[in-house]
Amino acid sequence: MKYLIYTIAIILLFGINLGLFGNLPFFGKTPSLLFLLTIYFALEKKDLDFFFIAFVSGVFLDFFSAHFFGAYTMSLLVLAAGLHLFTQNFILQELNWKFLIGVLLGSLALLQTFLWLYALSVSSMHLAQETESLGIYFNGFAGSFFYNLFLMYPVYFFYGYLRKLVDYITVRRRSLVR
């Protein structure tokens, strides 16, 4: 049941991303609400739902991107797994707003690098045309960062509501009585 709720939430965020923010570019860039949602699930220490979120979000982003299919899926899966391992092993305190800004900056840089590496590996296998340089992938990085930064907290509140909804439904489904 929770995966159905996650899928509906991903479809909702993807629709808002394409419908609303697709028509409001900032320095030629649009935000990625699914990327932000994946980050929040990867930072959580409770469970491994971030794999599902990263996979489904990546598939949706792959269908509507100009990259070779699988670029966003693989990039989001690797990024989310690395971020989750980093959170599990090195972060000892509660997350705060300063930490989230740093995580967004590093994650966005890693996402662009992973997308470039994926395109480079696909072009080296002659499955696609030659890829651009890494500088092309980082063109407009600042605009993308600030647009995602602007929407980071609304997506965080959506994430919190989604987690509460899923926790409420799972506890209620198990019929736990207090």
Image: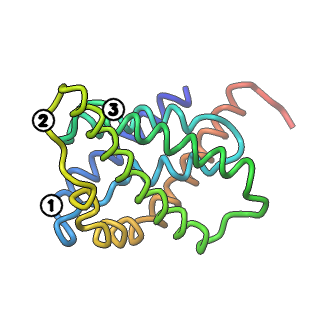
Residue 174 pos. (x, y %):
73, 25
Pick whichever of labels 1 and 3 is earlier in the sequence.
1
Q: Amino acid at mark 2?
A: Gln
Give the residue at mark 3: 59
Q: Residue 165 in the image: x percent, y percent?
A: 59, 43
Above or below residue 143? Residue 56 is above
**Mark found first going from the N terminus, 1 or 2:** 1
Amino acid type at image mark 1: Asn
- The answer to which of marks 3 and 2 sits earlier in the sequence is 3
Real-space Cα distance between discs 1 and 3?
22 Å
The quadrant the N terminus occupies is top right
Discs 1/3, front: 3
Question: Contact (CB < 8 A) between labels 1 and 3?
Answer: no
Q: Which residue is mark 2?
A: 129
* Real-space CA distance between mark 3 and mark 2, rounded to the nearest whole angstrom: 21 Å
Residue beneath label 1, please? 23
39 to the left or right of 142: right
Foreground tag (3 vs 2): 2
Q: Secondary structure at mark 3?
A: helix
Image quarter of the C terminus? top right
Give the image quarter of residue 168.
Answer: top right
Secondary structure, mark 2, is loop
